[in-house]
Image (cartoon, rainbow, N blue to C red):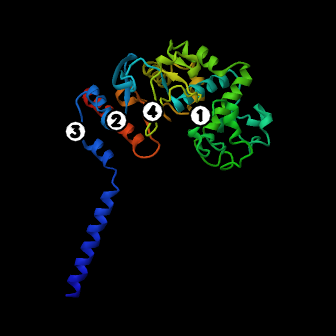
Amino acid sequence: MVKNKSIRIRRIVLLLGTLISLYFVPWPIVKAWILPLPSTVQEQVNKAGNYGFDGIIVCVNKKGNQSKLYTSGYKNRENKIPADPNALFKIASVSKLYNAVAIAKLVRDKKLSLDKTLADYLPELNGRIEYADKITLRMLVMHRSGIPNFTNTYMYWAAPKETSEEQLALVLNKPANFKPDEDYEYSNTNYLLLGKIMNRVLEYDNFQYIQDKILKPLNLKHTFGSIQNVNIDDVMSGYYVGYNSDLKTDNIGSILATAEDLSKFIRALNDGSAFRDQKEQEIYSSIYKYGHTGLIPGYQTIAKYHKNIDVVVIQYTNTVNFDGYNWNMSEIMYNRIIKILKKQQK
């Protein structure tokens, strides 16, 4: 009798535990993940609204550097302007790939040294950034400096800073998160400082160098260094969940590019044509990766090369929510597109 009662109690507890756990299951993610896979990329892209995105642009760049573009939703939801495959998009942290290539080229030309320190290049920061005399250029590129990330400061994205001086001021005189090269931590401050170092060595803006040494040789005419350098009507609108304003005019220091231009850059990065010679590519390979994602209010980017099917896939989505499942949904969308492309090659 006592044994039967104990078994019943255990079953009730297990049932309650199951019901409680089901409450916390991210059902939107589960649903998006288990739905039958469409047969075409366009069919999948058409579902962007179901994933919570106002608009989407996908570029599939296949062997021979041939691109096919897919869209759904809106370039601008207020005016019901359909998503434009040739719209400019803020690629956020994907910009780091261009900067890392520029660093590799400057190192190859002996204008920079990966083993020199932050204090060597920007001596005014010695004493204002902890371990400035120990943090090498290599550590900055590889996110092993320990310098705090300025975008992680309290409520940063509520009112983003528009100048590098304002951004850097947020972390000056702050303790390091760890000693140089003892750990890895992604920090936008690293690339902010790399930009300043390149500007000083070049004696002109580093994006001009990127244009001259990377974009022009690859014939990439639809990639720009700032929102200030483009026709604002060409830019895809960006939205944050719960915030009604269009974020496209915010100047947050991102490179802007069409999906096709970015796809060609990612292919050139991976097939080696972004580099002048093997030595330059070896320098790059020793310091950074060959694909990237980007996330800022209003703009999400996934940019990767898939060697097993020889395809570059760029995905732009223009609705963001740092809380909840928004980024997960963009990854599910992207991964399903890759699965479709793999099935099509069989």
Determine the CA span between mark 2 and mark 1: 30 Å
Between residue 81 and residue 304, name the one nearer to us: 81
Residue farthest along the bottom direction in this orientation: 1
Amino acid marked by disc 2: Met
Q: Earlier in the sequence, mark 1 or mark 4?
A: 4
**Position of residue 312 measured from the top left corner of the image (x, y, whole percent):** 40, 26
Task: Kindly identify which residue carries mark 4.
Answer: 239
Determine the CA span between mark 2 and mark 4: 18 Å
Task: Kindly identify which residue carries mark 2.
Answer: 333
Q: Secondary structure at mark 3?
A: loop
Residue 117: tell me if it is visible: no
Determine the CA span between mark 3 and mark 4: 29 Å
* Res 267 → quadrant: top left
Q: Residue 36, which numbered label?
A: 3
From the image, state whether disc 2 or disc 1 is nearer to you. Answer: 2
Using the image, determine if residue 286 lies above or below residue 257.
below
At 73% from the left and 36% from the top, the residue drawn is 118
At 45% from the left and 46% from the top, the residue drawn is 323
Task: Kindly identify which residue carries mark 1.
Answer: 287
Amino acid marked by disc 1: Ile
Q: Earlier in the sequence, mark 3 or mark 2?
A: 3
At 58% from the left and 30% from the top, the residue drawn is 252
